[in-house]
């Protein structure tokens, strides 16, 4: 059972900034929040990872509030090629194991011209 | 750097037949994962190997699914006998170290799309 909550879909236009928020209420103290991107007929691809506050790379920014119960992936000036499914991933604590990696259903982003 | 290799790319079988998928992780990656992705859903972890030992197979339907990673490199996932509900994309991923310990990113292959008729 997925422990992250994301919008099922989002629409945007080329050149706009897109923000996708993920809720993860039971995140473990030591866990990072990771976002993946998946195009049709391909495996997911790492986009960005963070622990708290803000992380930025050449592709996206990740905003994490102090309580870490949510995170927001920000894609600046999207293009048609950013049309994909975006997954928020955290590892949830489980007794006697390393924790479970749980993908939710992801957010299907559609970028229109 | 070569990525995670998987084969075949597509497979169509009839129910009750058997099928096998192959995965070659990134060189040097100790941890290997098999995921099942049903259309419209996120990937679901089936099994995790650390070298040639199983770390987590709690969600693997062991009555019909089996996996091995002999010599700690390549891995094979088998389904026998297949059911209609096994139709999905089977993804292989690898990490240099155990994800939980080092929060490393997963590297995925392109997957094998299985259709069970």
Image (cartoon, coloured by chain):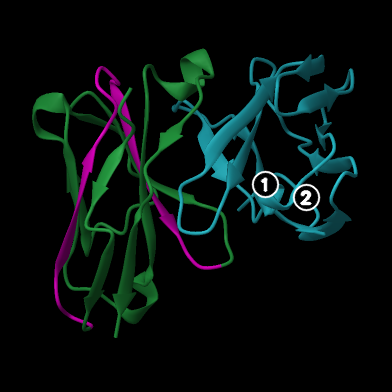
Chain in cyan on the image: A
Q: Which mark is residue A86?
A: 1
Compared with B11, B117 (above or below) is below
Give residue B4's quadrant in the image: top left
Given the current orientation, which residue lies at the most extreme front position?
Answer: A113
Q: In x, y percent, where is residue B107?
A: 43, 32
Q: Which mark is residue A8?
A: none
> Pointer 2: residues within 10 angstroms few (<14), some, or many (20+)?
many
Give residue A97's quadrant in the image: top left
- Which contiguous range is marked in magenta? B15-39
**Badge 1 sits on which subunit?**
A
Q: In x, y percent, where is residue B65?
A: 23, 59
For the residues bearing labels 1 and 2, Cβ distance under 8 angstroms: yes
Residue located beneath label 2 in the image: A6
**Badge 2 sits on which subunit?**
A
Q: In x, y percent, where is residue A14?
A: 84, 50
User: Is residue A2 shown left or right of residue B9?
Assistant: right
Residue at (18%, 80%) from the top-left corner? B16
In magenta segment, residue B65: no
> Pointer 1: residues within 10 angstroms few (<14), some, or many (20+)?
many
In magenta segment, residue B28: yes
Chain in green on the image: B
User: Is residue B94 shown left or right of residue A106?
Assistant: left
């Amino acid at each position: 059972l997925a422990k992250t909550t994301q919008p099922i879909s989002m629409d945007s236009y080329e050149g706009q900034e897109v923000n996708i928020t993920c809720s993860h209420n039971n995140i473990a103290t030591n866990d990072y929040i990771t976002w993946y991107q998946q195009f049709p007929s391909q495996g997911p691809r790492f986009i960005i990872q963070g622990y708290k506050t803000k992380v930025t790379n050449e592709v996206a920014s990740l905003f994490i509030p102090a309580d870490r119960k949510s995170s927001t992936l920000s894609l600046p000036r999207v293009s048609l090629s950013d049309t994909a499914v975006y997954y928020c991933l955290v590892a949830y604590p489980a007794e006697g194991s390393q924790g479970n990696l749980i993908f939710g259903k992801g957010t299907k982003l559609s970028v229109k011209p | 750097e070569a990525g995670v290799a998987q084969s075949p790319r597509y497979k169509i079988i009839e129910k009750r037949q058997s099928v096998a998928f192959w995965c070659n992780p990134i060189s040097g990656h100790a941890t290997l994962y098999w995921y099942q992705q049903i259309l419209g859903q996120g990937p679901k972890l089936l099994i995790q190997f650390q070298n040639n030992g199983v770390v987590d197979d709690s969600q693997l339907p062991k009555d019909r699914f089996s996996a091995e990673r002999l010599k700690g490199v390549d891995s094979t996932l088998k389904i026998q006998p297949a059911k209609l509900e096994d139709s999905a994309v089977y993804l292989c991923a690898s990490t240099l170290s155990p994800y939980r310990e080092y929060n490393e990113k997963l590297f995925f292959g392109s997957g094998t799309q299985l259709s069970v008729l």
